[in-house]
Image (tube, helix red, strand yellow):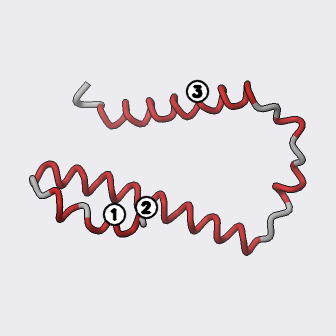
């Protein structure tokens, strides 16, 4: 398990996303949603949403990476400054 820990984490994350989507799909009827509202979002707002999601993904990855480094170096305070600054 130690050799393939990263692959197991990726697969378990994908499985959790799939289970969440299935449970959500079972409780929320998607056929009654007015999809024209979703598809009529202006491109300017779509770019803003994509930038926000990108910043969130990058800051989450940095926070994970810095937390691993901090635990290995026993320097918790220094390694969390940048990710926490980006998260806010």
Local SS, label 1: helix
Disc 3 target residue? 19
What percent of the width, then of the height, locates residue 9?
A: 38, 34
Decide if residue 50 is on the left or right side of residue 79.
right
Q: What label does residue 58 carry, if any? A: 2
Could you tell me how far apart the alpha carbons at marks 3 and 1 are, in whole angstroms? 30 Å
Vertically, is 36 above or below 16?
below
User: Which label sits in the foreground, 3 or 1?
Assistant: 1
Q: Residue 78 in the image: state x and y as whole percent.
A: 17, 65
Label of residue 33 in the image: none
Q: Position of residue 50 (x, y in %)?
A: 62, 64
Tell me if 11 is positioned left or right of 35 in this view: left
- Residue that mark 1 sits on: 84
Q: Nearer the viewer, residue 61 or 77?
A: 77
User: Based on the displayed image, in which of its 4 quarters is residue 48 positioned?
Assistant: bottom right
The CA span between labels 1 and 2 is 12 Å
CA gap, disc 3 and disc 2: 25 Å
The 10 Å Cα crowd at callout 2, few under 14, some 14 to 19, many 20 or more, is: some
Residue at 40%, 61% (x, y): give it. 59
> Sequence-wise, which precedes: disc 3 or disc 1?
3
Q: Nearer the viewer, residue 7 or 67?
A: 67
**Residue 29 pos. (x, y %):** 82, 31
**Dots 3, 1 in contact, CB < 8 A:** no
Q: Secondary structure at mark 3?
A: helix
Image point (56%, 66%), residue name? 52
Crowd class of label 3 (few under 14; some 14 to 19; many from 20; radius 10 Å): few
Q: From this viewpoint, which residue is outermost toward the bottom?
A: 44
Please tell me which of labels 1 and 2 falls first in the chain.
2
- Pick whichever of labels 3 and 2 is earlier in the sequence: 3
For the C terminus, the image quarter is bottom left
The residue nearer to you, when weighing 60 against 6, is 60
Q: Nearer the viewer, mark 1 or mark 2?
A: 1
């Amino acid at each position: 398990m130690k050799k393939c820990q990263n692959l197991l984490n990726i697969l378990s994350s994908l499985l959790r996303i799939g289970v969440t989507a299935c449970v959500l799909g079972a409780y929320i009827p998607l056929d009654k949603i007015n999809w024209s509202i979703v598809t009529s979002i202006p491109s300017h707002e779509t770019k803003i949403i994509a930038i926000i999601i990108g910043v969130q993904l990058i800051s989450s990855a940095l926070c994970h990476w810095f937390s691993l480094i901090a635990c290995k170096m026993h320097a918790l305070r220094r390694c969390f400054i940048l990710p926490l600054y980006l998260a806010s």
